[in-house]
Amino acid sequence: MRASLSRSDTANHQVEAERSAAFRRLAEQTLDPSFRLATAILGNPAEAEDAVQDAFVTAWRKWDSLRDDAKADAWFTRIVVNTCRDRLRRRARRRTDDISLHGSMATPDPSASVDDHVLLEQALSHLDADDQILIVLRYDHDLMLDDIARLIDIPTGTVKWRLNRAHQRLRSALERAGGRSR
């Protein structure tokens, strides 16, 4: 009986070592892109670090639910997006005062002034978490609709519809901000 326990313990130890090595590889491959994604979604590098760390903890705990190691990157990216979504939702619930907006901007432009970027970020902050994530994935990360659909696990048509709705809401937030400053 003692021999069978030690073989079982050895097998368990080997499985755990393989799991740790696979997770370490995932972490090395996805850390920087995940941090950039979280920073783009949350707009705050410190909060993005926390979100990515939370996502890694979640991934470790749910590692056994990963069915295909070849899809580990996409699986982990979904965890990062969901972690950021949760943080945005908590942030929206905590928001107690309205941010006063100034200026106006029709579209995000890298050559635009700092004020315009601030205005856009503030207008984005008034969108719900799902809308913010779609805008960031589409325009900041330049993902195509099919890629976004796979990433957040919804049909492409739904992504297109929600992105259109997000544009309308963003436009309204920017128009309201433009009206306040005049």
Image (tube, rainbow, N blue to C red):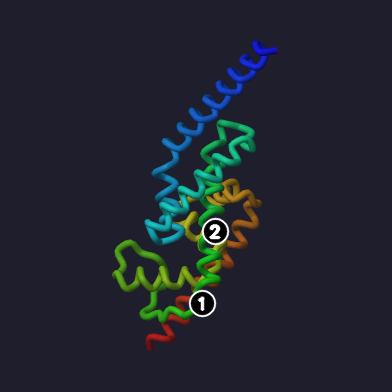
Instruction: Name the residue nearer the viewer: 153 or 19.
Output: 19
Residue 106, visible in the rendered structure: yes
Coordinates of residue 166 in the picture (x, y in percent) = 55, 66
Nearest-to-viewer mark from 2 and 1: 2
Instruction: Name the residue nearer the viewer: 83 or 175.
Output: 83
Give the quadrant of the C terminus: bottom left
Instruction: Name which residue type carries label 1.
Output: Ser
Instruction: Name which residue type carries label 2.
Output: Arg
Q: Residue at x 55, y 71 (%)?
A: 93
Residue sitting at the far top:
3
Mark 2, secondary structure of its residue: helix
Q: Residue at x 41, y 68 (%)?
A: 121
Coordinates of residue 114 in the picture (x, y in percent) = 30, 69
- Give the CA distance from mark 2 to mark 1: 22 Å
Residue sitting at the far front:
2
Question: On the image, numbered disc 2 is attached to which residue?
Answer: 85
| Crowd rating for badge 1 (residues with CA inside 10 Å; few <14, some 14–19, many 20+) | few
Residue sitting at the far bottom:
182
Question: On the image, numbered disc 1 is attached to which residue?
Answer: 172
Q: Residue at x 63, y 49 (%)?
A: 153
Q: Residue at x 50, y 74 (%)?
A: 95
Q: Is residue 107 above or below residue 20?
A: below
Coordinates of residue 35 in the picture (x, y in percent) = 41, 49
Mark 2 / mark 1, whichever is N-terminal: 2
